[in-house]
Amino acid sequence: MLLDRNTASPLYEQLKKVIEHKIKVGELKIDEQLPSERQLCEIYEVSRITVRQAISLAENEGLLYRKHGIGTFVTKPKIQQKLSSVDNFQTTLSQQGLVARTEKWSSEIISCNFQISRLLDIDIMEKVANLRLVGFADDSPIVFYDSYFTYDIGKKMIAAADEALMKNTPFSTLDLHKEISNDFPTHVEQTMEAHVSNEQLSKILRVEKGSPILRVTSIVYCNSKPVEYKETHYRGDKYKFFITRNL
C-alpha cells in the first residue's frame, strides 16, 4: 500500500493514519510488534525520517509504545470517559469490553477540618465519614476514589458500600447515593489537573512513583446542598477524557 504523494497531507501523517486503521480493524493487535523501521521504509517507500515521525505521532496519541532495544508495539486502548455526562463505573467499563470490580481501601469516621467543613457546608466541630475505593478493570487497578460525607450520610454510604462488596457488585459512590436516599444528586462541580503519583498512590494503583495521574476533584450536590466531596485519581496510562463542543 503506497502513500499519496499528490496531496497536501504530509507522508508521516498518512502513515500514522495507516497504522491507526490497521489497529482499528484488527490487522495489528494489542501488544503486537510493528515491522522494523527498515521494513516500513520498504513497504511504504518512504524515508526513515518519515517512519520515525509517524511512529512518534502514533506514540504521542497513545496508539503505540516502545520497548527500548526491542521495538515498537500496539498499545491497549485507553478507557474513554465522557465529560458531557456522568456514567457510573460499571457502565463506563462494560461499554468498552472491560470487567469492572471495586475494592474498599478504607472507611472511617474522622474529625472535620476547615477545608472539608467549607466544602460540605458544615460546622468544623462535626464528624465526617471518609470512604476510599479502588476501581479495577480486568483485575488491574485504574482509579482511586477518596470521598468525604457528612456523618449521617457517610454512615449510610459505608454500609451501602459493604453490602455491595458482599454481593461482589462493581460500584462507585454515584451508585451508592441511589441506595441510601430518594434524593439523588442533581449536579457536580469538577476541576481537573495533571499530577504524578506519590508513594501511596503508586502502591494503590500499582504504578511507579512519578507516573502520570489525572486528578479530578468533585463537589456533588443535591439541589443546592453539597452531599459529597471527592478526589478521584485516574491512571494516566489507562484513561483519556473527551467532550463534544458545539461551535
Image (tube, rainbow, N blue to C red):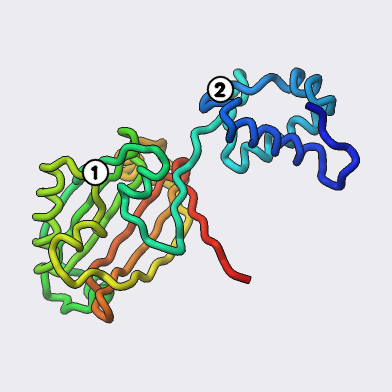
Say whether residue 211 is visible.
no
Read off the residue under disc 1. 102
Kind of residue at badge 1: Thr
| Residue at 46% over, 48% down | 80
User: Looking at this rendering, what residue extends furthest in the front direction?
Assistant: 25
Callout 2 environment at 10 Å: few (<14), some (14 to 19), or many (20+)? Answer: some
Outermost residue to the right: 6
Disc 1 is placed on an element classified as strand
Mark 2 residue type: Glu
Task: Please indicate, yes or no, whether residue 182 appears anywhere in the rendered image.
Answer: yes
In which quadrant of the rendered image does the N terminus lie? top right
Q: Nearer the viewer, residue 103 or 177?
A: 177
Q: Is residue 220 above or below residue 75?
A: below
Residue 79 screen position, x and y as percent: 44, 44
Q: Residue 221's quadrant in the figure? A: bottom left
Q: Which residue is mark 2?
A: 32
Q: CA distance from mark 2 to mark 1?
A: 30 Å
> Dot 1: few (<14), some (14–19), or many (≥20) neighbours within 10 Å?
many
Left or right: residue 98 compared with residue 183:
right
Q: Disc 2 on helix, strand or loop?
A: loop
Towards the viewer: 212 or 142: 142
Q: Residue at x 76, y 38 (%)?
A: 14
Residue positioned 11% across, 60% down in the render: 109
Mark toward the start of the polypeptide (2 vs 1): 2
141, 27: nearer the viewer: 27
Q: In the rendered image, which quarter is residue 66 located in? A: top right
Q: Quadrant of the C terminus?
A: bottom right
